[in-house]
Image (tube, grey):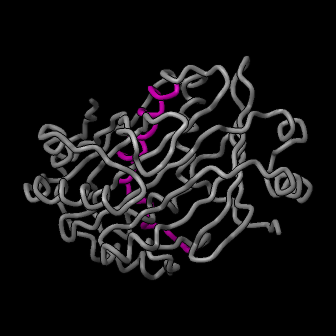
Amino acid sequence: MVRRMDSRRPVQVLAVRAALFVLALGQFGPACAETVPNDDHLEEIPKLLEQYSRQGDFQLPTLSKAELDSLNAGEAVVTLFREPPGEKLESVDTSRLVGWKIVAAPRLLVWLSALGGSDEPSARLHHGVLQQRAAGAYVSYHHMDLPWPFKARQWTLLCEENLSLAEDTHGVIWEHRWSLLPRDDAMLEAAYQRGLIPGLTRHALDDSVYLRANRGAWIVFDLGASGTLVAASMDVDFGGHIPDALVRSFAKHQLRTFLESLSDLRGKHYNAAPMVYDGRGLPIPREAATIATRVQPELPLVKTSAVTER
């Protein structure tokens, strides 16, 4: 049954929105102040990434010494990664966008900043939650207009927390993941008839191309007093005639902009409307964000962050 739910915009639209920036807006990106480096990260992070690659949904690439140094200095690292044959997930295109960032804040605040933050309104992107499921999982619909001569795109996602990963890692690793659902005309028609997607027209619903692939995850590692490591893995296939290189180039830009924005800690303003669930599938009360804000370490700001790419 399709029900009216909150209209929050899941973070997994970032890679898809990149095409819109490619075709309409051009490059931009704010700088962000970062914190003092911590040499302990150089030994801890490779172990955590290796652990996730064994137990999580995706294979994460091994970071070079230069990339670890960049992370440790407060920089965002973004790259394209081609999975080896026989990986856990089949893919239309085995090249994925991957990024990392260390944020000097408690994991709960970083998690809320990634999943609970709202984007600016967009005349081209319409979205809504169609179904709410157990443990914070939900089904969301997205429609994006593209500039002429490209056809609009639409897609439906299953978004959920990886509960088994949180349990297997004793809560050290939280993962929010999403995957493309097969087109369900009955569900989409019901959503349209009930007006669940503001701004969606009959023509847009009937004449838009359904994405061939959209899957990914936000992975959040608890570094204790040192802060939080955020990793992202995502891939999107628009189909049609949009050049892959164009989409990927700007998807990289959009991802690193988002990673850098996490240091703004939008999660400090979380009010539980809508409710966000943690990596264990438990609802996060508003008071939890307030407490996390109070215990956030006061670390000095030392530099303006750069971006590292392979």
**Residue lying furthest top:** 149
- Which secondary structure class fits the magenta region best? helix
Q: Nearer the viewer, residue 167 or 40?
A: 167
Residue 269 is a magenta residue = yes
Quarter holding the N terminus is bottom right
Q: Where is residue 81, by image quadrant?
A: top left
Q: Is residue 208 left or right of residue 222?
A: right
Q: Position of residue 295 (x, y in %)?
A: 27, 76
Residue at figure coordinates x 89%, y 35% from the top left = 203
Which quadrant is the C terminus positioned in? top left
Q: Nearer the viewer, residue 235 or 261?
A: 235
Relative to 256, say whether 197 is above or below: below
Corner quadrant of residue 166: bottom left
Q: Nearer the viewer, residue 26 or 185?
A: 185
Query: Percent from the top left, x then y, of residue 272?
Result: 56, 74
Residue reaching furthest to the front: 86
Determine if the magenta segment contains residue 230: no
Q: Residue at x 42, y 80 (%)?
A: 288
Tell me what residue is drawn at x 87 percent, y 55 percent. Answer: 186
Residue 102's place in the image compared with 269, above or below, is above
Q: Does residue 195 appear left or right of residue 302 in this picture?
A: right
Q: In percent of the image, x 81 and y 58: which residue is there? A: 196
Residue 146 spot, x, y in % from top left = 69, 28
In this image, 266 relative to 71: left or right? right
| Magenta residues, start to end | 247-272
Q: x%, y% of residue 134? A: 62, 77
Task: Indicate whether 39 appears above or below 224.
Answer: above
* Residue 131 shown left or right of residue 19 in the figure: right
**Tag count:** 0
